[in-house]
Image (cartoon, grey):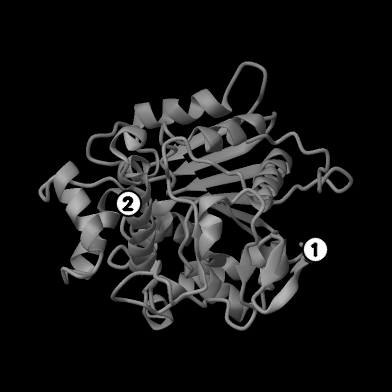
Amino acid sequence: MSFAIPLDPFADYPYSMDTYILGAGFSYSFAQYLFPLTDTLVKKGIEKFPHPKSYGALKDFIFRMFSDSESINFEKLATFLLNDPLKYITGNSLANYQIYLDLIGLVANVLKVDQALIKNSENYSLMQNWLSKLNKNGDSIITFNYDLILEQVLAELKWNPLTGYCMDFYIPGLDRQIPWVEPKANQIKYLKLHGSLNWQMEKDAFYDVSDKRIYFSVNDVSNYWNNYFQGYYREKYSYYPYIIPPLIGKKYENKSIQRLWHISQSLLENSKRIFIIGYSLPESDVIAEYMLRDANNSDKEIKIVRKLGQNESKSDVENRFKRIFFSESNNNKIEFMDMDAMEFIRGLGF
């Protein structure tokens, strides 16, 4: 992937508002009983769909490769299935790809949470107040999450997804592209770098995403499919959720997604304050690290908000981010906060 795109959407109008980067820890903090972290995502899916006919091949693969007792990392499992190093020897590439699609369907079904459950969260009113303030300021949110927590609140704020997502979309049934138009100054830019449950792609496009259409339904911001039992990837469906799993060595061939990353890089470069909330910056996520390093100019205020895990030390996490954001040539102010995401947002006074 390259960010060397000539058009800089903020070259003539330098951006000076705040940018928030959200990871899985943000959604987990909002409602941990609904949105698991990466290390427990697959396990929760298997528990949610216990019937042997649900994702049977996927379950067999997990049992053969990992055993039932082992904690299954979504990133590692997806990488095994999509980048099988023995596929040309064993001839199982097609089978593994179908299992991979079922894995994505399983994860999407776990994260497909009813609107009523989201609105019943004790943190929902906090989200309303926070996003209302960000929307008025015209601030930006960059996320690596697929879920639709924020969309529930943004819909109440009359947020326009066809501009706010900063994406070129096709509309199902309409054979022309709806190009992205710069949103109004007082509207959030919400950039979902790994895709979203309510973005859609045709079945065959998953084999070659380089120049394929990404669809969006304008009728319902929170529209997602309702096949709880067999998963998404079945012949009777025409479109499937477009999400990019956390593969080791992720690929971003789709041109619309490439531009989305470029816009994100431009936002970070022109933001005075950057808040990184609930994102662990894994070593394998080299594309995200490249974007952060590339946007790392001087005089920024950077706050990293994340609850430390059991086997983590504050100094190790601080040093990981400082290696990216701090050098002798810039004057960035970096602060790490060992704090839950909702606790931090509540502390902002919303």
Residue 288 in picture, x, y percent from top left:
54, 38
How packed mark 1 is, by other alpha carbons closer than 10 Å (few <14, some 14-19, many 20 or more), is: few
Residue 185 relative to residue 21: left or right:
right
Q: Nearer the viewer, residue 159 or 65?
A: 65
Residue 151 in picture, x, y percent from top left:
54, 71
Closest to the camera, between mark 1 and mark 2, is: 2
Residue drawn where x is 77% and y is 64% of the image:
183
Q: How far apart are the alpha carbons under marks 1 and 2?
A: 41 Å
Q: Is residue 349 visible?
A: no
Q: Which residue is mark 2?
A: 95
Specify the amino acid type for callout 1.
Val
Mark 1 or mark 2: which comes first in sequence?
2
Q: Nearer the viewer, residue 345 or 323?
A: 323
Q: Which mark is residue 203?
A: none
In the rendered view, tell whether residue 159 sits above or below residue 166. below
In the rendered view, tell whether residue 241 sits above or below residue 119. above
Residue 112 in picture, x, y percent from top left:
39, 71
In the rendered view, tell whether residue 37 sits above or below residue 218. above
How packed mark 2 is, by other alpha carbons closer than 10 Å (few <14, some 14-19, many 20 or more), is: few
Residue 13 relative to residue 219: left or right:
right
For the N terminus, give its image quadrant. top right
Specify the amino acid type for callout 2.
Ala
Q: Which residue is mark 1?
A: 181
SS class of the residue under badge 1? loop
Residue 164 relative to residue 6: left or right:
left
Residue drawn where x is 34% and y is 69% of the image:
231
Residue furthest out toward the top: 328
Q: Nearer the viewer, residue 176 or 158?
A: 176
SS class of the residue under badge 2? helix
